[in-house]
Image (cartoon, rainbow, N blue to C red):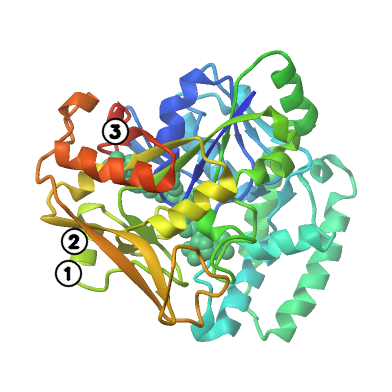
């Protein structure tokens, strides 16, 4: 049996915290897509930890963690992260497994990412520059190197062949940065990776499922960044939605049970691209300040706005969400008035659907107002204590989406999660 936990907006919904909270209920936590563009924040022994490549179950002694075939893996980031995890006394050699089919991010992928963004100028995606797009391009272009390849004697030869191909591309893009330092780090990290448990991920996970173990698939990014269903071209290069679990781990759709969708009580986006409910005013500034909305991977300020039910409804549909988790509810504590977007007016026409084209049209959000609860909710432990006004806000969202908020997160801490 596999449950899925993923983000329903443009990423950074608080997935890491929620996976870490639920991890004791599962035997396996598996990442199925994305790479070090992800930044999942957890608090361990009251210390903040940001994970980019390692699944968020790593701090639980009895939880197995799998980096699935759908992930793109940066060996250097993985190595750095292993050092952090070790400093908490966790033996990553024991509980971390990597699929041999996982594609590797090469130093030239990072260079290509940067070159591509530079070439796009004002139309840049706002990529995290971690090499994600180029690595997935080499996967679908059938050129990439996989984790299983690093156990082969011909790895360096294969690497050099691909590097030459990349170099020609970089030359044609007029990109001449010296990447030899990255390469040195890369080969050190590749050596380090040889000590890992590199497994056939699809047999590994299906054997666990057959043995009755519980698996939680941990999404990265968010549904609106999905390469097919997100705000293309301002998206990432993988399928972030629940369907990505089947191809990213090798599990059949019938094995999937719950799809837990995580949404903030408002909305943020980092990088370029459409964001209909974005606030360019003092309220947006307040959300950023109170919510500490700065990217966990790049440190960039996140764009902030009201919760967008049109986009959320779409995300619930394409994911088959069965349960919602609402995070960062406490960030709204101080606001007199809250708004939720219930429809879009696209080029003058009202719709409750996400349009195909979101960049070349004018989208005005229609907003419904709610009274703020004006109460500190961060110390509350039970649903009964939550303010009535918050319950009205949540009830409206439940009704609009046809799925219920099952948990409300009222602070970044492990214990700040209330079951409804
Ligand atoms: P992820 O990428 O979805 O795992 O989310 P990030 O870690 O990038 O961003 C979420 C941020 O919000 C982190 O700094 C978390 O510590 C923080 N956070 C998570 N849940 C809550 C919450 O309920 N309230 C507050 N105030 N912060 C939260
Ligand atoms: P987590 O898992 C928020 C955004 C980037 C950019 C676009 C493409 O922490 O929620 P990429 O590096 O994939 O080429 O960037 O996607 N992006 C994220 N935004 N959270 C993330 O991950 C993101 N991963 C990528 O900012 O707009
Ligand atoms: Mg993040």
State the SS at label 2. helix
Q: Which label number is shown at residue 282?
A: 1
Counting the numbered discs, the total is 3
Q: Is mark 3 within 8 Å of ligand 1?
A: no
Q: Which label number is shown at residue 413?
A: 3
| Residue 344 spot, x, y in % from top left | 40, 69
The correct choice, above or below, for 386 with respect to 76 in the image is: above
| Residue 363 spot, x, y in % from top left | 41, 76
Q: Residue at x 68, y 39 (%)?
A: 68
Tell which of 43 and 122 is nearer to you: 122
Q: Image quadrant of residue 346? A: bottom left
Where the N terminus falls, by quadrant?
top right
Q: Image quadrant of residue 183? A: bottom right
Residue furthest toward the front? 350
**Residue beneath disc 2:** 286
Q: Residue at x 49, y 63 (%)?
A: 353
Relative placement, left or right, of 387 versus 278 is left
Q: Is mark 1 within 8 Å of ligand 1?
A: no
Tell which of 132 and 386 is nearer to you: 386
| Residue 266 spot, x, y in % from top left | 31, 54
Cβ atoms under marks 2 and 1 closer than 8 Å: yes
Q: Dividing the image into four equal quarters, which quarter contains ligand 1?
A: top left
Where the C terminus falls, by quadrant?
top left
Which mark's residue is nearer the viewer, 2 or 3? 2
Q: Residue at x 40, y 81 (%)?
A: 348
The correct choice, above or below, for 143 with respect to 123 in the image is: above
Viewer can see residue 129: no
State the SS at label 1. helix
Nearest to N terminus: mark 1 or mark 3: 1
Q: Which label number is shown at residue 28?
A: none
């Amino acid at each position: 049996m596999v449950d899925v936990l993923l983000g329903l907006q443009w990423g950074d919904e608080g997935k890491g915290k929620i996976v870490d909270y639920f991890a004791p209920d599962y035997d396996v936590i598996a990442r199925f897509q994305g790479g070090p563009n992800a930044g999942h924040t957890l608090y361990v022994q009251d210390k903040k930890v940001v994970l980019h490549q390692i699944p968020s179950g790593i701090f639980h002694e009895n939880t197995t963690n799998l980096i699935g075939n759908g992930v793109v893996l940066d060996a250097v980031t993985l190595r750095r992260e292993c050092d952090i995890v070790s400093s908490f006394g966790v033996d990553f050699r024991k509980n971390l497994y990597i699929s041999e089919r996982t594609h590797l991010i090469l130093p030239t992928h990072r260079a290509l990412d940067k070159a591509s963004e530079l070439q796009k100028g004002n139309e840049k995606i706002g990529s995290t520059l971690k090499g994600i797009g180029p690595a997935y391009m080499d996967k679908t272009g059938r050129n990439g190197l996989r984790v299983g390849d690093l156990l082969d004697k011909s790895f360096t030869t294969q690497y050099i062949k691909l590097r030459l191909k990349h170099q020609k591309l970089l030359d044609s893009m007029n990109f001449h940065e010296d990447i030899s330092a990255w390469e040195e780090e890369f080969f050190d990290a590749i050596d380090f990776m040889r000590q890992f448990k590199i497994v056939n991920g699809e047999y590994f996970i299906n054997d666990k499922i057959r043995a009755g173990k519980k698996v939680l698939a941990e999404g990265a990014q968010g549904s609106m960044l999905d390469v097919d269903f997100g705000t293309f071209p301002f998206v990432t290069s993988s399928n972030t939605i629940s369907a990505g679990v089947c191809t990213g781990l090798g599990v059949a759709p019938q094995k999937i049970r719950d799809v837990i969708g995580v949404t903030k009580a408002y909305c943020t986006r980092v990088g370029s691209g459409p964001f209909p409910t974005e606030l360019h005013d003092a309220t947006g500034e307040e959300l950023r300040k109170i919510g500490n909305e700065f990217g966990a991977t790049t440190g960039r300020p996140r764009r902030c706005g009201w919760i967008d039910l049109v986009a959320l409804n779409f995300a619930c549909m394409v994911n088959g969400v069965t349960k919602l988790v609402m995070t960062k509810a406490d960030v709204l504590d101080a606001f007199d008035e809250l708004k939720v977007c219930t429809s879009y007016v696209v080029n003058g026409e009202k719709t409750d659907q996400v349009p195909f084209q979101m960049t070349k049209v004018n989208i005005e959000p229609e907003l419904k107002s709610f009274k703020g609860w004006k109460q500190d909710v961060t110390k509350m432990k039970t649903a009964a204590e939550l303010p009535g006004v918050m319950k009205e806000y949540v009830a409206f969202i439940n009704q609009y989406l046809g799925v219920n908020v099952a948990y409300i997160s009222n602070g970044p801490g492990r214990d700040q999660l209330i079951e409804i």
